[in-house]
Image (spheres, grey):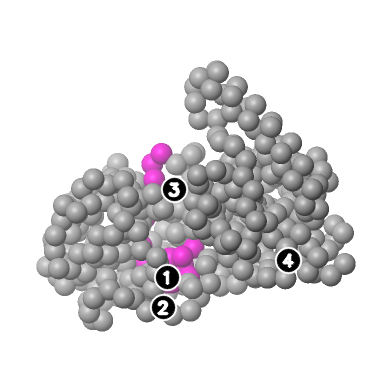
């Protein structure tokens, strides 16, 4: 069999943290026949390129206390497993690659029943419950953080870091009117924005502007006060497509601690103040952030302890110090793995050929 005949199903859905690494791997496998498994009305409907056939299943997490609601979700999950199993058979899929989340459960179980090998990529330091439970049926669990291997005693693991989109690996121009010499603060709340962080930084921003800083604030689309602050050094945007150029230019990021965002900060060598999302499952963003804080690449603050006065002072101290930010930049760069997508693509080829 030739490589061009390998048929790969990528199961990735929901958020950029699941989709962007999967897309980065897909870009490294142009000679494979790739199809995509997603969920209706999620981000993959717009992000997945049209040359990857998109199949959808109705699956969600058990996040309700209603017995009837959970029974309905369970029945949908069972139906999804057999739907994916039929898809694997009909499309002659050789290998499944998934980046976790709700969709990983039916994808992995269906592949196990059909005898199709699975590679699972877990980007977070603390793996999700779905990942931990279903990892036993995967040929390899690829890890975003090396220390995560402790959570997979029954699985074969391989540390590859987390892939980023290809534009992060080459210099990108920034099309915003920010002077070259001005310090730039970028506020990133994740793909959904972060209203609590938004409110916090707006209370501090004027002091930062007084020392010459500019701010690009990615507010998300759920912040009703997004336009409440007006200043020539302030750029509030619901989202910004050129994240690579933005982080490459940034002197400091104020950010949530999703694994994908942290990887982008590492690859662009951007120091950060990390404020983990306090309601993330099992507080997994704090585990991610602690790796960067322990390495000296970021400051870590829990949302409940970070007052406007404290954040204002921390940022001013960083902007006024000629040494700290450059040191953090160097330590952030040490966390970067530039060829993560290539490592995962090589693993896909290796497993596909071995299983055939």
Between circles 3 and 4, the one closer to the viewer is 4
Local crowd size for mark 2, using a 10 Å CA cut-off: few (<14), some (14–19), many (≥20): some
Disc marking residue 172: 2
**Residue assigned mark 1:** 244
Q: Nearer the viewer, residue 19 or 34?
A: 34
Q: Is residue 157 above or below residue 345?
A: above
Looking at the picture, does residue 266 appear above or below residue 94?
A: below
Furthest toward the top, the residue is 67
CB atoms of marks 1 and 2 within 8 Å = yes
As helix, strand or loop, the secondary structure at mark 4 comes to loop
**Can you identify the residue that label 4 sits on?**
32
Measuring 53% from the left and 72% from the top, which residue is drawn there? 166
Is 334 covered by the magenta stretch?
A: no
Residue 280: image x %, image y %? 44, 41
**Residue 102 as seen in the image, left or right of residue 188:** right
**Residue toward you, 306 or 268:** 268
Find the magenta span and give its range. 263-279
């Amino acid at each position: 069999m030739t490589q061009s005949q390998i048929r790969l199903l990528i199961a990735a859905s929901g958020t950029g943290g699941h989709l962007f690494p999967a897309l980065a791997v897909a870009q490294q496998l142009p000679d494979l026949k790739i199809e995509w498994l997603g969920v209706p009305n999620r981000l993959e409907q717009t992000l997945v390129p049209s040359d990857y056939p998109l199949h959808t299943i109705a699956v969600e997490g058990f996040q309700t206390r209603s017995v009837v609601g959970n029974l309905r979700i369970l029945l949908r999950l069972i139906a999804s497993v057999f739907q994916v199993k039929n898809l694997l058979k009909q499309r002659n899929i050789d290998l499944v690659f998934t980046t976790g989340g709700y969709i990983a459960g039916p994808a992995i179980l269906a592949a196990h029943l059909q005898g199709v090998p699975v590679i699972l990529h877990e980007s977070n330091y603390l793996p999700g419950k779905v990942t931990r439970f279903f990892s036993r049926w995967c040929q390899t669990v690829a890890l975003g953080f090396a220390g995560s291997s402790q959570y997979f005693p029954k699985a074969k693991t391989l540390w590859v870091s987390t892939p980023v989109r290809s534009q992060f690996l080459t210099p990108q121009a920034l099309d915003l009117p920010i002077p070259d010499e001005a310090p730039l603060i970028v506020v990133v709340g994740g793909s959904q924005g972060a209203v609590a962080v938004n409110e916090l930084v707006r209370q501090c921003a004027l002091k930062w502007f007084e020392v010459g800083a500019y701010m690009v604030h990615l507010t998300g689309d759920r912040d009703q006060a997004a336009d409440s602050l007006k200043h020539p050094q302030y750029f509030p945007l619901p989202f910004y497509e050129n994240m690579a150029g933005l982080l490459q230019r940034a002197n400091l990021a104020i950010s949530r601690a999703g694994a994908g965002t942290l990887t982008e900060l590492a690859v662009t060598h951007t120091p950060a103040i990390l404020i983990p999302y306090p309601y993330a499952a099992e507080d997994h963003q704090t585990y991610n952030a602690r790796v960067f804080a322990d390495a000296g690449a970021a400051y870590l603050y829990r949302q409940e302890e970070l007052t406007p006065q404290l954040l204002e002072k921390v940022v001013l101290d960083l902007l006024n110090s000629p040494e700290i930010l450059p040191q953090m930049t160097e330590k952030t760069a040490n966390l970067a793995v530039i060829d993560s997508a290539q490592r995962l693509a090589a693993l896909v080829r290796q497993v596909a050929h071995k299983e055939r």
